[in-house]
Image (cartoon, rainbow, N blue to C red):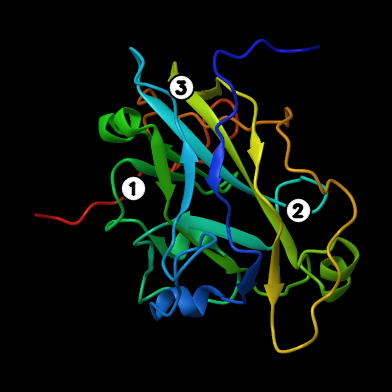
Amino acid sequence: MSVDYTYSPPTIIIQPKSEWHYRNMRDLASKHIPLLSGNGPQRTPIRLSVPPKSDRPMFLSVQILTANREPHPSKVIVPVKTQVKTSDRRHDNNLDCLDFSQCSETDLFNPVTRIIYSLITPEEHAVGQKDIRVYMFNLYQSQTITKELIETQQLHMCQLAFTLCYQDNGRYQPISESSFSSWIEEKRTVQSRSSPSMCSDTTSQSVPYPMMYVGQGSPDNTKENEIGFLIIPFPRSSS
């Protein structure tokens, strides 16, 4: 069944670079991790168009997908200034070790769906553009993220999906179809593998869109709510 969206998909003005060099959580912890770059000179950001300001706060969601346009199991994107707790540097891929206390309050990260929701500011609405400032890193190989899985599902490849949304009754609701970036290929010292032949276009189309409950009705924000998503509020530095 087709859905009538309020807005057209956001246009990608500056695509991400086609090559990305491997990073892991250790690199994030040591702050040796650059922002995900856009095409152009060094430090060029990924940039999207955004509509004029509406009567409600508007968000841009950013999600990382596989070659089959499924949520990526081995790559994670997090807001700029995300850190790793010094007392909790494990290798079990537990994202509880991430520290968002230095992140902007306008950037929210869902640790279950691994989607970033970034508020579009009045200034961004006014100029009609929004820059995407995120880190990307790989999870460690494990019993679930195996070498075979990485090869068969082409997990060295990824793509970003961008969707406009409102926060409605504590949940993020899409108000546009998704726009898909060009392909990003992980590079190491070995020869690169071929790009996937499937889903090679970057046209907009509807994809399943996970919702995140952010209401204040739950007496315990660290427990699962009635729709099954774990809510982890951003910790803030004490004044």
Disc 1 vs disc 3: which is toward the camera?
3
Q: Position of residue 203 (x, y in %)?
A: 73, 36
Residue ID for mark 1: 234
- Locate residue 80 relative to residue 68 in the image: left or right: left
> Looking at the figure, which quarter contains the N terminus?
top right
Residue drawn at 86 percent across, 59 percent down: 196
Which residue is identified by label 3?
A: 166
Q: Amino acid at mark 3?
A: Tyr
Q: Mark 2 falls on what kind of element?
A: loop
Q: Secondary structure at mark 3?
A: strand
Query: How far across and how far down the image is residue 120, in percent?
Result: 36, 33
Residue at horizontal 37 percent and vertical 44 percent from the top: 107
Earlier along the polypeptide chain: callout 2 or callout 1? 2
Q: CA distance from mark 2 to mark 1?
A: 27 Å
**Sequence order check: which comes first, mark 1 or mark 3?**
3
Q: With 105 as the anchor, is 19 left or right in this view?
A: right
In the picture, the quarter occupied by the C terminus is bottom left
Callout 2 crowding tier (Cα within 10 Å): few <14, some 14–19, many ≥20: many
> Which residue corresponds to the image point at 27% horizontal and 58% vertical from the top-left?
102
Give me the C-alpha separation between circle 1 and circle 3: 20 Å
Question: Which amino acid type is marked by label 2?
Answer: Thr
* Residue under numbered circle 2: 66
What amino acid does circle 1 point to? Answer: Phe
Along the line of sight, the residue nearer the viewer: 147 or 201: 201
* Residue 2 badge: none
Q: Quadrant of residue 82?
A: bottom left
Q: Position of residue 182 (x, y in %)?
A: 68, 52
Q: CA distance from mark 3 to mark 2?
A: 25 Å
Image-based side of 28 in relation to 181, left or right? left
